[in-house]
Amino acid sequence: MPNRVLPVLGCLALALVWLLDLGVIQPNRIVPGTGHGLISAVGGPWAGLVSLVLAGCVLLSFLPLRRRYLPLLGLVGLSLALLPLLLEVFAGRHLPEDAPYARSSIGAGFWCLLFLLSLMLIEILGRLGSGRGLQLMILAVIVGSWLWILRGGGLESLSLVREFNARPDKFEQALWTHLALAFGAVGISAGLAFLLALKMIRSVAWRRPILGAVSFLQTIPSLAVFGLLIAPLSALAAAFPALQAMGIRGIGWAPALLALVAYSLLPMVRNTFVALTEVPESLADAGRGMGMNERQLFFKLKLPLALPVIVEGVRITTIQAIGLTAVAALIGAGGFGSFIFQGLGQAAMDLVLLGALPTIALALLADALLTMLAASLKPTPATA
Amino acid sequence: MIELKNVTRRFGDAVAVDRINLTVETGEVCVLVGSSGCGKSTTLRMINQLLPHSEGQILVDGNDVTAMNPEQLRLNMGYVIQGTGLFPHWTVARNIAMVPQLLKWPRERIDERVHELLTLLDLDQATHANKYPQQLSGGQAQRVGVARALAANPNILLMDEPFGALDAITRENLQLEMLRIQSQLRKTTVFVTHDIDEALRLATRIAVMDQGRIIQHDTPENILRRPASVFVENLVGKQDRGLKLMSLHTVRDLMEAPPQPREPEPGADGLKEDDSLRVALSIMLWQNWSQVPVFNADGQETGTITRDRIIQEGA
Amino acid sequence: MIELKNVTRRFGDAVAVDRINLTVETGEVCVLVGSSGCGKSTTLRMINQLLPHSEGQILVDGNDVTAMNPEQLRLNMGYVIQGTGLFPHWTVARNIAMVPQLLKWPRERIDERVHELLTLLDLDQATHANKYPQQLSGGQAQRVGVARALAANPNILLMDEPFGALDAITRENLQLEMLRIQSQLRKTTVFVTHDIDEALRLATRIAVMDQGRIIQHDTPENILRRPASVFVENLVGKQDRGLKLMSLHTVRDLMEAPPQPREPEPGADGLKEDDSLRVALSIMLWQNWSQVPVFNADGQETGTITRDRIIQEGA
Amino acid sequence: ADPVVVSSKIDTEGSVLGQMVLQSLEGAGIPVENRLQLGGTSIVRNAIKAGEIDIYPEYTGNAAFFHDQADRDIWKDADKAYQEAARLDKEAHNIVWLEPAEANNTWAMSVRGDLARENNLATLEDHANYINEGGAFKFAASAEFVESASALPAFQEAYGFKLESDQLLILSGGNTAATLRAAALNNNDVNGAMTYGTDGGLDALDLKVMEDTAGVQPVYQPAPIVRGEVLEAYPQIREVLTPIFESLDLETLQRLNGQVAVNGVPADTVARDYLDSLAQD
Amino acid sequence: MRVWLPPVMLTVLLCALSAGMPALEPLFEWMQPDKQNVIYERESFLFLLQNHLMLVVISALVGTVAAVAGGIFATRPAGRDFLPLVSQIASIGQTFPPVAVLALAVPVLGFGEAPILVALILYGLLPILRNTLAGLEGVDATVRQAALGMGMSPFQVLLQVELPLAGRVILAGIRTSVTINIATAAIGSTIGARTLGDPVIAGLVNGNTAYVLQGAILIGMLALTVDSLFEAAERVWDRRFLPQTAG
Ligand SMILES: Nc1ncnc2c1ncn2[C@@H]1O[C@H](COP(=O)(O)OP(=O)(O)OP(=O)(O)O)[C@@H](O)[C@H]1O
Ligand SMILES: Nc1ncnc2c1ncn2[C@@H]1O[C@H](COP(=O)(O)OP(=O)(O)OP(=O)(O)O)[C@@H](O)[C@H]1O
Ligand SMILES: [Mg+2]
Ligand SMILES: [Mg+2]
């Protein structure tokens, strides 16, 4: 059966890459630039190559061949890996020599190409029924190749790279702050959630209040929570100088962490509780009937069976925390969000990208790694 | 030996088991039957104290179970739970090795024992030992459940509808296997089922329960021939009793044996000594035989049986 | 009348149904039996075109099904799907009323029909009509499924293991009900089951399938007496064939009737005309009777039957 | 001794001036700690009062609000404003105002060059007339500008016009780079923007500042302010910073800010280049 | 109708609070003695509430229609090929942080209400899409077969069987989507949309805690109100279609 998805995506990519601007040349950081379509941006031969590759994908996926997905994987993967070369060619052709502050930036056409090629890759990997391992490997190859191309220096003029080069140390600092806040919150709430879940398992009376409270927390929008925490925390810091000395005050990392922990509780508590209680009572009975005591039952039976679901809770929480940490920059907590909001303030869109893209990348990476972890913790192989 | 003396179990105000007295002799298979919800599982689970009893006394080999450490008590009793209850995150081998591991047997002894049990229950070591429960068919899983219960060589077996969810053919095979194992090992067994044919086949004695009480506790033959009440009569299937009785006996019981077994004529048709009288009758009706030779397991002709005798004396 | 001519169905490269020919006469019950995955459901679903066939021709009352509007085709065929497939968000009454509603019957006529069907299938209007499927027991749900299929009075019934998931007693009741309904309404029926006893009981003719082919298509008696292959022989249960044959006939067939029915002596024991020979034999063995009176449904003595005659001629 | 914690506001000029302070102190051998671009005015102000930071560049006109004396006319005179700010802060918080730069970074309203030329707009009076006659106008500003009594409300009162809320594009937390750009790109029909006197992008983006003929705005001269104790510990701070701030005039600041905001040169590079050029002179 | 009581009460409270916030001036003055202005006055709270709500409602409506249509398309025979891709997009897309999505909308769409609306629609569509797929895929195959087998047309099956059965799951998706969008819209005031986030951001910029509190309280109340509305809707749905669990 011919695949219908890939031709649709391929044709769409082909159309958009010709219709939209591939790249933009800006005379400086904030003045809008002039866009260049495919031919004008990279010249005839490259334009031909791009079109040829896309047409090739369409054609290949159209053919009712049995083994067409492997070559397609190669073609699309390679295209993605080498995509930044287009920008390099573009910058080389169009960047004026005498304007040191002129910069190239990425046009809608390029983004569309990137997006549609990624979709094609996802589709191909899905049809191949590939495991997470292969997917991560391909991702690593693509990202590696991008970094390698960036290293080469041909993309120095890219606005995004310029923004990064203006503040490499800040970037690193933002990365660590972001990670520390997100993972700190996940860690703390994991511990807390475990205790709460145990409490809920022990005592039925606590179930509704605890679940009600944590879902209430989840409902309140992040901005409101950050805002609401300012007053009490400032008051607290004013009342107890010791706390202030620890760095706890109305704005900064303390309210951010507190809010992130509050947000993380619901998925953690729910998943931990459900996982531990959904171990069938008949299994527990079997264990007991064989002579296990309650401790052995918990550590040998319940916990191993519950672990994948608990890790799933950790995954949801982590992704959410990474996103919310970006919002926390509004109350001075730092992290990639500070680039986003600075960029919005300065109308420097590539600074916004410098904050947004790593946040997305972090979320995707955390998602992939934790999904893999959950899969590897699955107590049993997928049923044959 | 297991003794229940005036044992009662309540759930809230409801009485699940009501002052029952039951003695299961060493080496005996006691089968509990009764309609759904009559208290069979509850009775079983009180014996290994998964449920404490509300009143009365339960003795295992003369000792009161409430005085014993419950883990110790259970380690000495094999327990086959309804629906297998295998641990899904452990392999077949690890599931079987569970109790020996709890008992801290040495590694080699455990391996050896697992191997032995796999062989006993006709599961191939190479193909099955490292599978996970979900990768087994229902019948295989049931056998692993039985193996797990047997692993540490307990003197007592508690089996709660161990073949409950199986199709007729697998069920029959497991019953035969169970009879074979029992004839070798002679465990004191309490067996719960809702299948009367299974009960008749496996039991030394059957205890019929209704609404938490034991209505009758007797041998299969007596349960069929002399049901204590209308309830028992209905439970065992009034109409089909004649044929059911026939399945309690084998051809061996009614055949006329010559002094000496002899080699059969080549290609001769006949029955086996171990065939039940019911099977014998069905075949004879089908073939319209009135008399056939009987062969033993080695294929020697050991006697003859007549249709009239089956009909006269079979039921 | 349903005719399948050289019908084949493939899934990818696999052949699920392989060039079968099957004719189901009007008013006949054709039962499809065979091991799991042999293509029974596929065959059924090709008849109402839920699955298009790959090759061959399917005629319903002489018309090629591919030429018909599929919705029209299906509206004229009652379909009982495996596992009931009731709509969980509709009440029992609405579920039953489904096809009449699709056919835009007037409100009162639908209500009347639903009432009629509930009565026919022994479901109490007051208690059950407004329940939702999840609130029914398995047997009740099955009956609603049958009622839904019968609702618009289709000439053809397709039933896919309609009693599959039921316990033995409910199953037996539904079979009896089905026989009763069939004796009144005479629908052309294709019925899938994996239970041989059920097939023997309900079928006008049985089609035995194996690996997508029809191995034998014949009356129950012939299937038992003259199995076309070893496969059929094993499928119907070789050992028990004698007793099975007996269940195809009733006491009425073998009793000796006096010219005139007469009132029985008060309190006299006996058999019923409709009892199967198998039941008769079992009871006679149990009671050690060699001859008993037979009563009809009104309790009049209509004849006598002897054990010897059953044994001689029953199988 | 403890390092001097150098901070600044989060905006472009803050980053440039802050880097100058940081680098020059460092060059003078004073141990420093970098807490630049900490946040908005209120955040750095509270931080220095709490002693969390030691030095940052502040604007003279802001003292009016710190001490709740916004109504006085004294703030509209550069010298008097500086003296008054220094006095008030010294008394209240022992914070010392060092030599200010000769540049008035006051809030201003600018319009697109084409609009100004078509309608002959040069002063805020012209501008008010244009608005009152119903001319199409949409103004991009930060929340602070719209909010602060001395900014938009003061302009509106002095020149007699009123911007309705649908005539405002408020970029919460946005600074002039964003408002400038919005006006330059005519985003959402924006054709006017809040700007600062020292903004670097005015020329590049063809925006015209409306002259504040009524002198509504206080003078905002940037000056480093430092906690008294720290200045005692490192008295050389004054000598290091005075020549640098004296050298900064309006054009220089505009140029330096433009380097960062428009050309995207990192602030530390801009500061270093400027300090180097000072050293060469 | 007892289920509707909490949302109605919350709605009344929310409106009263938005309209009557100035009345609370003394309270905020006590909190924040050193500020001249303690009540946010640039826009009326009622206007902000209305604008905020409008953004969320429009994005939810458009998102629901698009997502349900997409979900239906991907589960029909004609669109089956796209099902794996669509469900992958739905789940991968949800790992994108909302702030990042909002930020990415600016370079493409500029500042103001229009871009935020587009971002909210696109982002809010994903949970609904995911739940629509799950709901439709979750409909028991035998039920669908039964419906076809009884003679329903595919369209009737969709309308009378599949959608009612999947509806509860879809509703839950809309609830998730709206919860996220209320939060994201609040952040939207950083890119020039006028929402209840405005006082919060203004307060953060100016160090005016009273503003922050006013905004935060109203956003929180709005979220609770809408959530309780969905809670009630789900109850009613359960009572209508899943009587056995409600009873
Ligand atoms: N944990 C419990 N709490 C309350 N009642 C219980 C509990 N366990 C069992 N019962 C009740 O006790 C009675 C006996 O239950 P039991 O499980 O022993 O029945 P059973 O004979 O094993 O039935 P089945 O054949 O259906 O397994 C039933 O009425 C049941 O409802
Ligand atoms: N949609 C399908 N796609 C691929 N193979 C199918 C499909 N439906 C059925 N099959 C295959 O066709 C064969 C016949 O299936 P069918 O459902 O007709 O079996 P059956 O006789 O009804 O079995 P059972 O008794 O288990 O219901 C099986 O091998 C099955 O795996
Ligand atoms: Mg039980
Ligand atoms: Mg089937």
Image (cartoon, coloured by chain):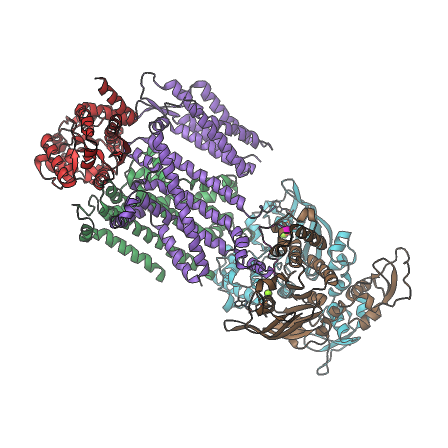
Chain colours: A purple, B brown, C cyan, D red, E green
Q: Quadrant of residue C282?
A: bottom right
* Residue E104 visible within the image: no
Q: Quadrant of residue B209?
A: bottom right
Does the magenta segment cover residue A68? no
**Residue furthest front in the image:** D1
Q: Quadrant of the N terminus of chain E?
A: bottom left
Percent position (x, y) of residue A296?
A: 54, 56
Please tell me which residue lies in front, A305 or E158.
A305
- x then y, percent, for residue A248: 30, 45
- Which residue does the image show at 20% across and 27% down from the upper left? D241
Q: Quadrant of the C terminus of chain E?
A: bottom left
Left or right of residue A138, residue C52 in this image: right
Secondary structure mainly formed by the magenta segment: loop
Across the whole image, how many numbered discs are drawn on residues?
0
User: Quick check: is B90 in the magenta stretch?
Assistant: yes
Tell me where the magenta segment starts and ends, as one range: B81-93
Query: E240 and D124: which one is in front?
Result: D124
- Residue B101 falls in which quadrant of the image? bottom right
Classify residue A10 as left or right of residue B85. left
Apparent side of residue A57 relative to residue E26 in the rendered image (left or right): right
Looking at the image, residue B277 lies above or below residue A88: below
